[in-house]
Image (cartoon, rainbow, N blue to C red):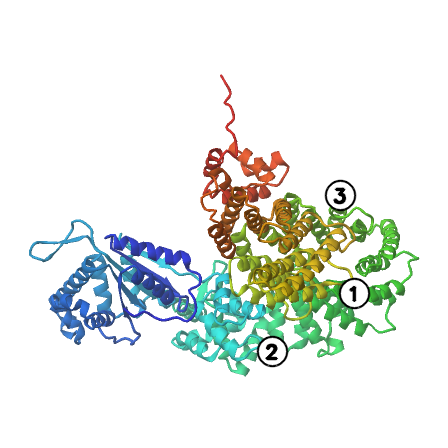
Amino acid sequence: MPTTSFTTPFIGREDELARLTRVLDRARAGEARAVLVAGDAGVGKTRLLAEAAGHATEAGTTVVTGHCVDLGDVGLPYLPFTEIVGVLADDERFSAALASHPVVDRLLGDGSGDARDAGGRLQLFEGMASLLTDLAETAPLLLVLEDLHWADQSSRDLLRFLLSRGTLQSRVRSRGGDPVTGGAPGQRLTVFASYRADDLHRRHPLRPLLAELVRLPVVERLELRPMPDGEVARLVRAQQVAPLPDATVRRIVERAEGNAFYAEELFAATSETMPGAASAVPSGLADVLLIRFEQLAATAQQVLRTAAVAGRRVEHDLLRDTVQLPEEELESALREAVGRQLLVPGDDDTYSFRHALIREAVYADLLPGERVRLHRAFAGVLAGRGHRAESAAERAHHSRESHDLADALAASLEAADHAGRVRAPAEELRHLEAALDLWSAVPAAARPDGFDTVTLTLRASAAAAHAGETHRAVSLTRSALANVGNDEDSELAARVRYTLAGNLMRIDNLAAAFTYSNEALAMIPADPPSRTWVWAAATHVMAARYMGEDEAAHRVALKALRIAEELEVSDAQADLLISLVGLEGDSRRTPGGRARLREARELARRAGNASVEMRALFNLSIGAHESGDLDECLTWLTEGLERAGRVGLLSSPYPVEMRYLRSLMLYTLGQWDECLRAAETEFVGLPTAGRYAIGPALSVALARGDQHAAERARALLDGPFDWMATLVAGLLLTDAAVLRRDAEGALEQFRTTLAALIDEAGTTPHVAVRLAALALAAVADAVVESRLTGDEEGVDRWTETGKELVELGRVSAAKGEDGTPQGPEGLAWLARAEAEWARAGARPDGGGGVELSVGAWEKAVAAFGYGDVYEQARCQLRLAEALLGAERRDEAAAHARAARDTAVRLGAVPLRDEVERLIRRGRLAETASAAERAPLLTARENDVLLLLSRGRTNRQIGEELFISGKTASVHVSNILAKLGAASRTEAVAIAYREGLVESEPSASG
């Protein structure tokens, strides 16, 4: 039977589809079932049923669909069943079955006789049940009924009969052919019926039938809830091939609120007005949304219009005082709006629009004068409540919309104060920017006392920085600098300049930051000592270090630290200590350096300066990561992000970097599904400057063969320059070129990225060694290909390029951006670069460096043993290839199998395919033993596995190994994944079987 055609892939709803598929499987085995699929209009019922029908058809089930249609109070009787019988009648396969049940022919007429004659109705119902039974005996049958909320009374009665007394009940036939209830089950029939939950008001005629049907043992209900934001984002991106800006996707996801139809309509409207997201509800969608609103009585419409002016949610008392209706009329109107599923009552005496777009459509339908009048009414009611913090933001909005700008300014400042107290920097920024917009429009006499534009703008820039809007913070501070004037207080002028310098460093405009920090330091004397000079000095130390002026930075830092201690400015003291860790030899990778960072963290915490505390926590976590101590890194990341969440700084620069680092850890440790979940949930709502945090999730997608991952990585480069986004995108795009064996593309991306990352002082970043190693992989491929085709000129050219890359990698590893050697990760990438260089020099005839290549790849495999499972598997593939060239087949097979096992576990399809090609080409499939197939655990994982075998909990494991319980949990998850175990008990059993742990002798009595 034909099904609805869709142009976009099926996204999300995997659990719901699996549930429907299980029902179909049971029906094919003879267990008849029915599922009532409920959900709001547009949430995806039709698409889910179409997907399930497609699965059923592929499995040999006959699928037939009937649609209910909204024909008002007078509907056509049996309409969906008439459609079903009509479809069956047009198919010659079912002509014999239809001929044996002539009573069903009545459905193809007007049905009027049956509607009046109870005996005729029963005969029709029995005939329909018998027809379906016969069809199901021939082949499994799926009956789909769409839009049951529009079903006529006759169709509802027939469905009640079929589900409660007819085909889905256990039935056998007597010898005479008449159906008899009871007996053995055996009906291969399934019924899926969908209806709109948001259309079922209290007096809807379908409600009693649903209540009756769900009590039947053969009927179950499946509710389609709104789709998660991550799935809606995937749906939106699937609408077109070219990547969409993340801001556009976020806006559509935010407004669609999990409704697939709304998301598609909003996308279509956005596409017509690109670039940027459309702000108004598309006219076609607005018409759909307003249909139910226009069915309300006049008073209910008035109440709903007033509620729309309040916003998505409104308190009952506020609505009552604004609408000014008698209590009984208001309650009657609200009951009607709730019954029509337009408003939803809350537990806290509030009402919310069922969907934000309904509210938008109603609000957009207001006349301009009506809108101003209602906003003025709300502002007046809120003003009468006094200066309550929770109503200040509402009052500011309503005053502005009603053109009372003086009150809007006062309320905006009040709302900003409240947002600052509850540590909501994004909201504080919004209110401060609103106040700055209003400032010049309000007469000086009407402005609140104690404020000026410079200090307000500085405060707004701080809120922007805390909210992660770094470019906005720079813009605001530049505005403050333009307004400060030459006659202003020198301390204020200096504060503006060092604030601007700090913001400029966050967007990697280092030369300008150094200039402004220098100016700030020169504007005020160091004697007498002052807090302003100390902070100007602390900022200048950071800027000078970025510019390579380490000697000057060290000198100023020591002087400023002494003054900070004298003045007891402990947060500035903490900031200076963090800078000195990198200036005095004890880098953050060393135990001594991290001890000083812990001291700085404690000083900042006691001073209440959360921003400096975040800097300390970030340096502690990244220092542990750089030194290869992943357990300590995870501990600091967990503590840092929990602390950032408590103080409202999750979107500020250092916590965003910690969020990225945590995602990178999940990727590195092979927790790829969790890495993707974090990108879909935790990273929704990230500031634009933090978009690079999805990089590890894009790495997962790339490694799994997602064709769009490179396009999304390229989108990270849109907008103003961002150092981290450039780094993340550069790595991804270089690796993408490697995977498609595009040496020219990889080399070009390597050069472009490195040029962008080298700062004004000419410092080569640590990541250069990784970029060089990736580019070398493509170059080695090109050398091997040129050698195989006899292109000696190509061999020479690519070999020369490879030599340049490996030399760069060596220099970068020996002396990184801060003058210190690389840590374990950087050294692993250097080993990879050396191995790729050796591969380029190895010849297929067994000479020319094959053993050298084997040794280099063995070192690379060992180097990535610090915890990077995917890169270790990629190196194992190359090691197996080199071992095969050296005729060491058993070892080659062992490493090939290990690489394939990792690729399969991670879902890294391209790597798996490449390994399997090597196994087939080298005929290695039969040479590996069971012991060699055992997954390789790290030393730490072996320690955890031993304690796991002794029955320890995660907390106990953490205590014995001096790690956090959460870190222990990560190790346990790794072990389960590597062993392919579903539980801790199964993992221990596998470990004993594979000899990974030995049985301990039992204590004798």
Local packing at callout 3 (Cα closer than 10 Å; few below 14, some 14-19, many 20+) is some
**Residue in the foreground of this view, choosing between 153 and 327:** 153
Q: Secondary structure at mark 3?
A: helix
Residue holding disc 3: 595
Q: Horizontally, is 20 left or right of 569 in the view? A: left
Residue 387 in view (yes/no): no
For marks 1 and 3, the one nearer the N-term is 3
**Residue in the foreground of this view, choosing between 723 and 382:** 723
The x, y position of residue 256, in whole percent, is 49, 68
Rendered image: mark on residue 760: 1
Q: Amino acid at mark 2?
A: Ser
Q: CA distance from mark 1 to mark 3?
A: 31 Å
Figure quadrant of the N terminus: bottom left
**Residue in the foreground of this view, choosing between 471 and 4:** 4
When the figure is inspected, residue 731 is found, relative to residue 301, above or below; the finding is above
Q: CA distance from mark 1 to mark 2?
A: 51 Å
Labels 1 & 2 near each other (Cβ < 8 A): no
Q: Horizontally, is 895 left or right of 513 in the view? A: left
When the figure is inspected, residue 317 is found, relative to residue 946, above or below; the finding is below
Q: Secondary structure at mark 2?
A: loop
When the figure is inspected, residue 888 is found, relative to residue 539, above or below; the finding is above
Residue holding disc 2: 402
Name the residue at 76% across, 63% down: 759
User: Could you say which quadrant of the image residue 376 lies in?
Assistant: bottom right
* Tag in front: 3 or 2: 3
